[in-house]
Image (cartoon, rainbow, N blue to C red):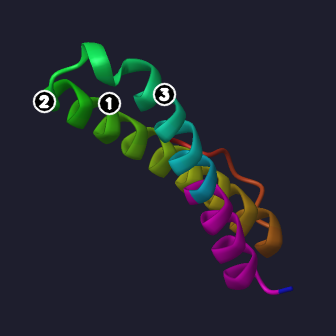
């Protein structure tokens, strides 16, 4: 499988996991959170997943290309 297809599959899986876990957490927290706080939790979740997905894909692409340099955030 090529790198782009693999990254797309991984991204779809990350989105599914993110939505499932966010929905679970929001059900637990929603009675005690304001709209603003719920939006902040959603935004935090999005940012964290995007960072994790970016790092994962960048690492995968480097390995596929044979690059062995250090990854710097």
Q: State which tag comes first along the sequence, 1 or 2.
A: 2
Provide residue 71's location: percent of width, then percent of height. 61, 46
State the CA–CA distance, disc 1 to disc 2. 9 Å
- Give the residue displayed 38% in from the left and 19% down from the top: 29
Q: State which tag comes first along the sequence, 3 or 2.
A: 3
State the CA–CA distance, disc 3 to disc 2. 16 Å
Q: In terms of image quadrants, where is residue 63? A: bottom right
As drawn, the residue found furthest toward the top would be 32
In which quadrant is the N terminus drawn?
bottom right
Above/below status of 1 relative to 66? below
Q: Is residue 63 left or right of residue 50?
A: right
Could you tell me which secondary element the residue under label 3 belongs to? helix
Tell whether label 3 touches label 1 (CB within 8 Å).
yes
- Give the residue displayed 54% in from the left and 55% down from the top: 54
- Asked whether 61 or 69 is in front, the reply is 61
Name the residue that disc number 2 marks: 36
State the CA–CA distance, disc 1 to disc 3. 9 Å
Provide residue 47's location: percent of width, then percent of height. 38, 43
How many residues crowd mark 1 within 10 Å: few (<14), some (14–19), many (20+)? Answer: some
Name the residue that disc number 1 marks: 41
Q: State which tag comes first along the sequence, 1 or 3.
A: 3
Q: Is residue 40 left or right of residue 16?
A: left
The magenta region covers: 2-15
Name the residue that disc number 3 marks: 25
């Amino acid at each position: 499988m090529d790198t782009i297809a693999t990254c797309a599959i991984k991204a779809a899986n990350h989105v599914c996991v993110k939505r499932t876990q966010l929905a679970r957490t929001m059900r637990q927290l929603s009675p005690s959170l304001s709209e603003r706080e719920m939006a902040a939790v959603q935004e935090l979740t999005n940012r964290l997943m995007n960072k994790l997905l970016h790092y994962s894909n960048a690492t995968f692409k480097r390995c596929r290309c044979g690059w062995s340099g250090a990854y710097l955030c």
